[in-house]
Image (cartoon, rainbow, N blue to C red):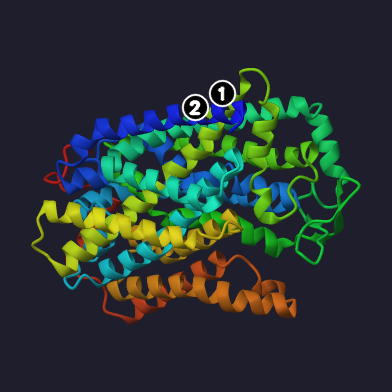
Amino acid sequence: MTSEQIMHLVAMIIYMAVVITIGIIFAKRANKSSDDYFLGGRSLGPWVTAFSASASDMSGWLLMGLPGVAYWCGLADAAWTAIGLALGTYLNWLIVSKRLRRYSVRANNSITLPDFFSNRFREKKKTIMTISAMFILIFFTVYAASCFVTCGKLFSTLFDLPYIPMMILGAVFVLAYTILGGFLAESASDFMQAIVMIIALIAVVIVGTITAGGLGAVIDNAKSIPGFFEFFNIASPALNEAGEQIIDSGVAQFSDPKPYGVLSVCSMLAWGLGYFGMPQVLLRFMAIRKEKELKASRRIAIVWIVVSLTVAVFIGIMGRDLFPATHTTASSAENIFITITTTIFSSGALPILAGFIMAGILAATISSSDSYLLIAASAFAKNIYKGVIDKKASDKKIMWATRITLGAIAVIAMLLALNENSVIFKLVSFAWAGFGATFGPLMLFSLFWKRTTKAGAIAGMISGGAMVFIWKLLINPLGAHFGISALTIYELLPAFIISCIFIVVVSLLTKKPSAEIEADFEAVKNGETDPAMTENN
């Protein structure tokens, strides 16, 4: 191991030690009860709520996946995705956060998303709870796999070590930390990690731009590549038979750019729809200590999101100027942030700084994967084990079920992450679509349409979740094969629309909700909660 790699390692060990310390500090409180473990007793302040929601949402995808897309094919895909995410973040905080915080208290003080949907419709057989918990287990396992891929790529690239052992090492660390501290530790560390992530991004973009010769030089280089720096065209790397970009005399080759039409723009903007169904973000709305603090959280979150997304996209553009022929596949392109950082911070004591910046990737990965594992485990332990299998289960049994589930999910996610050529962006996009289409429409209709019925809720979840698989695995390939662009759009958009249609149609065809359910809805609409449930509203 070189002296530079040793300094990288030292910096990352220091960072991980801080994260573990946070877990130990909160472990005692987290293990008092399952409510504290899963939702922190609704005690988050506005800054922690905003930063932890943002950090848990973005993951290593922000520092590796998004810059990788920009590096590989230019501005269009990455920029429209970022715009969609920024709009989705703002609208989610604006229209969903307050009503969900209020409604989750009214709905029997719900502490998980399946809890909320089940209690919202006052179901006795726990059908909604079971279905929603199963979808959470499925999609969060894919999400966790994307985080483990990030860990593997990070460590193997930094230290020239085999991918699989490094991926497993990162997964074990995340699992141990999640078991230790629960929701409060996760949220507190996410607050710190959100700060680390944005500092890392800004530091790299400033030093990288200076190294490249200034902002003008970066933009001029991007404009010299056909379709690379355009919103309505997309660059097309020229590939050889092995699927690698052709390099001629050190110059990366590109084919003619492809048009990026309205359908493609709408497809990428649809990423914003995913926010309405993201459990890791929605739980922060439920966990804030006071509803009135959500306004401050919204402002903090949107500033963080806009700055971090903009910088992440620009890093990919800048990477093409600094290292035009270094990464020749879409999977390898996701290492551009690491390549830039380890190169421009390679002299003197700067590798220590590079190590801390690399900790930004680790920060992003931990902040997301612990959220994903915890929410998935809670879906089984609280909603399936306690809600269906053993309704009289003690808190101690629930906690044991949680830890066993965490281990099982982590093992499955590691199996999914074994392929080091996995593209993080693609893994995240599939899981994101799954949550957005399964829970997004149901969340909006549950909060804002009194006529929504239990049958409509079930139909919406199943149709949305199923359509993600159908569109991704069947319709999308057919569209690509026959050249039908309308069928190759991001699966979240059609699945979200289908889910909305099913919720409305089935709800109108079934008996309207009971008087008690309608009374709950009207109370929440009018700003009321059950005072017996909380003292913080």
What amino acid is found at the position of numbered circle 1 in the picture? Ile
Looking at this view, is 514 or 356 the one in front? 356
Q: CA distance from mark 1 to mark 2?
A: 8 Å
Q: Position of residue 272 (x, y in %)?
A: 54, 53
Looking at this view, is 536 or 371 the one in front? 371
Q: Does residue 215 sit above or below 34 in this rendering?
A: above
Q: Residue at x 38, y 70 (%)?
A: 461
Label 2's element? Answer: helix
Q: Residue furthest top?
A: 348
For the residues bearing labels 1 and 2, Cβ distance under 8 angstroms: yes
Is residue 286 visible from the viewing direction of this image?
Answer: yes
Q: Is residue 144 left or right of residue 76?
A: left
Q: Which mark is residue 352?
A: 1
| Number of numbered callouts drawn | 2
Q: Quadrant of the N terminus?
A: top right
Of label 1 and label 2, which has the lower sequence position? 2
Q: Is residue 319 left or right of residue 431?
A: right
Which residue is label 2 attached to?
A: 10
Q: Position of residue 370 (x, y in %)?
A: 37, 46
Q: Position of residue 504 (x, y in %)?
A: 40, 73
Q: Residue at x 49, y 67 (%)?
A: 496
Q: Residue furthest right?
A: 249
Label 1's element? Answer: helix
Q: Quadrant of the C terminus?
A: top left
